Amino acid sequence: MDEAARLAVFRAQVENVRELTTAKRHLNRAVNLALRKADSASARIHTKVLTLIFCAWVEATFSKLIHTPYGFSLDEIGQIKEVTNKFGIEAGWSKCLELGLRHVSGSSKSNYVPNIKQKLTRIIKAYVVDPSLIRNKIAHGQWVVALNRENDAQNADLTPALDSLDVITVTIWFGVYEYLAMIIEILIESPDRTFHRDYWIEITKLESFLERAEHWSLAEKITKLKKKPPRQRGP
């Protein structure tokens, strides 16, 4: 890959992310309409499709991020892609963090960078890697009962996760990932200019978002949707 190829991939993924964002908006409307009508079957189906969109959106955004011009070197991009292709999304994100944080100058506290990596790794595990496991089951046709890797028994962990999946959960995934993507973008583009300042700004916003999200519930969302007047359509 050369710089021209990097830019071409970056521009392609910008377009892909834009289209996936549109798909997300349309599916959210479909879920909301189903919830307003108490059509639980439609809401459940659209939520599973929204989960597929979320993981596609994450994948496209991650690719866009690592190909950001004036960010990672071409060699670093190659390392991230190689690890991701061989070992999966979790390894790819870990390599992305490792390489990005190498460009961050140390502070007076020797644990500064390791603490950032630990915090971001926890967020990635909970809101990127774990959702991808649910997505994989849905993508392989396991919409109600998840099977184990060998497909010879039920997966006792992911079956309940499929059963409890709702639009609140997926909305939180999207929200967290937007903050995470902003942090990674800052890390890649300005590791020693604005990262130290902006990291704490964004991580504080993320933590505040998660605190608010703890009080969200599907029942409350349905109540609010039913109180809203229906959207007026044109002739």
Image (spheres, rainbow, N blue to C red):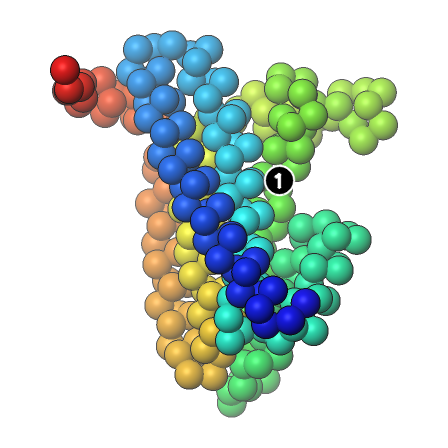
Q: Quadrant of residue 117?
A: bottom right
Q: Position of residue 37 (x, y in %)?
A: 30, 11
Question: SS of the residue at dot 1?
Answer: helix
Q: Residue at x 48, y 18 (%)?
A: 44
Q: Residues within 10 Å of mark 1 (few under 14, many from 20)?
A: many
In the displayed structure, 202 sits above or below 140; it is below
In the displayed structure, 149 sits above or below 146; it is below
Q: Residue at x 29, y 16 (%)?
A: 36
Question: In the displayed image of the protein, which residue is found farthest to the front?
Answer: 4
Instruction: Decide which of 8, 70 is in the foreground and name it.
Output: 8
Q: Position of residue 85 (x, y in %)?
A: 75, 52
In the displayed structure, 30 sits above or below 125; it is above
Q: Residue at x 45, y 40 (%)?
A: 20
Specify the quadrant that holds the C terminus.
top left
Q: Position of residue 115 (x, y in %)?
A: 56, 71
Specify the quadrant that holds the N terminus.
bottom right
Question: In the displayed image of the protein, which residue is found farthest to the bottom?
Answer: 108
Q: In the image, what residue type sits under mark 1?
A: Ser
Q: Quadrant of residue 5?
A: bottom right
Is residue 29 rendered to the left or right of residue 15?
left
Q: Residue at x 33, y 45 (%)?
A: 212
